[in-house]
Image (cartoon, rainbow, N blue to C red):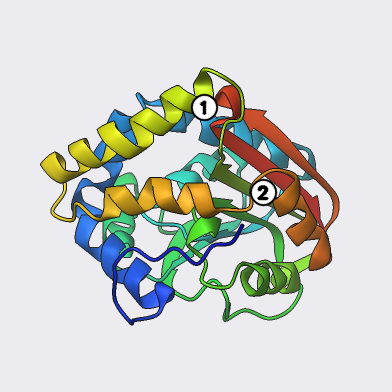
Amino acid sequence: MGTNVKPYNQEDSKKEQVASMFNNIAKTYDFLNHFLSLGIDIIWRKKAIKELIAIQPKMILDVATGTGDFAFEALSLHPDKIIGVDISEGMLKIAQEKIDKRKESHRFEVRLGDSEKLLFEDNTFDAVTVSFGVRNFENLDKGLSDINRVLRNGGKLVVLEFSNPKKFPIKQLYNFYSFKILPLFGKLFSNDARAYTYLPESVKAFPDGEDFLLRMKGVGFKESKCISLGFGICSIYTGIK
């Protein structure tokens, strides 16, 4: 199981295609995210952020920050600074508008950046978060390795990502919703129908559960664990450098 599914049938790299796709859907991304998940994604983010309460991080890096929802949730931890990086200028534009509207620029800033080549010194951050973004990495191991590099010793990684439910009837219902209903709504409300076909394909191809924990261990994370949410539809992964 790998992560080589691309948004479009083109020769461009996955990284280039993912950036283009998110640029295309940036304006409707938040609406469709909350609408199609019935708001459950908000609850999942809150649960994931609770995994950082014990370490009270002062410097947080939010990788694949998108429109910034996960980083905004992390502000509840009262960090000194959160930096969000993403390869999509369109998504970062929305995030910046939200930062300005909420007057949080002193605590939260966003930068255009590559998750596999983070432009930060070693041992910079107390925590790194990734929300629904690791499955879009072109090279998963390289991305996880670079995240490990910028974490300080004892720092914590928290990843929130979709999973493939295994039990009947959740598996069957989830697959029907993902491959039939989701693309239909994506086509109606987004100007890039392919984006919402890519979503379930990328989830299906992602090495979830124990497979992802092994990838984390392979790049140096310790005490890694997986917390299943929503009957196996989503998972929180955590690891310590």
Give 59 or 138, whichever is nearer the viewer: 138
Identify the secondary structure beneath mark 2: strand
Q: Is residue 130 at least partly visible in the picture?
A: yes
Q: Is residue 65 left or right of residue 134?
A: left
- Please state which of the two labelled residues, at mark 1 or mark 2, is closer to the viewer: 1
Residue 79 x, y percent position in the rendering: 62, 50
Name the N-terminal-most of marks 1 and 2.
2
Instruction: Tell me if 129 is positioned left or right of 149 in this view.
Output: left
Q: Can residue 100 be seen by looking at this rendering?
A: no
Task: Identify the amino acid type marked 2.
Answer: Val
Q: Which residue is mark 1?
A: 171
Front position in the image: 33 or 73: 33
x 20%, y 46%: residue: 28
**Residue 153 vs residue 44: left or right?**
right
The residue indicated by pointer 2 is 158
Residue that appears at 41% across and 73% down: 14
CB contact under 8 Å: marks 1 and 2 = no
**Residue type at mark 1?**
Lys
Residue at x-position 27% and y-position 70%:
20
Mark 1, residues whose alpha carbon is within 10 Å: few (<14), some, or many (≥20)?
A: some
Disc 2 crowd, CA 10 A, few/some/many (<14, 14-19, 20+) = many
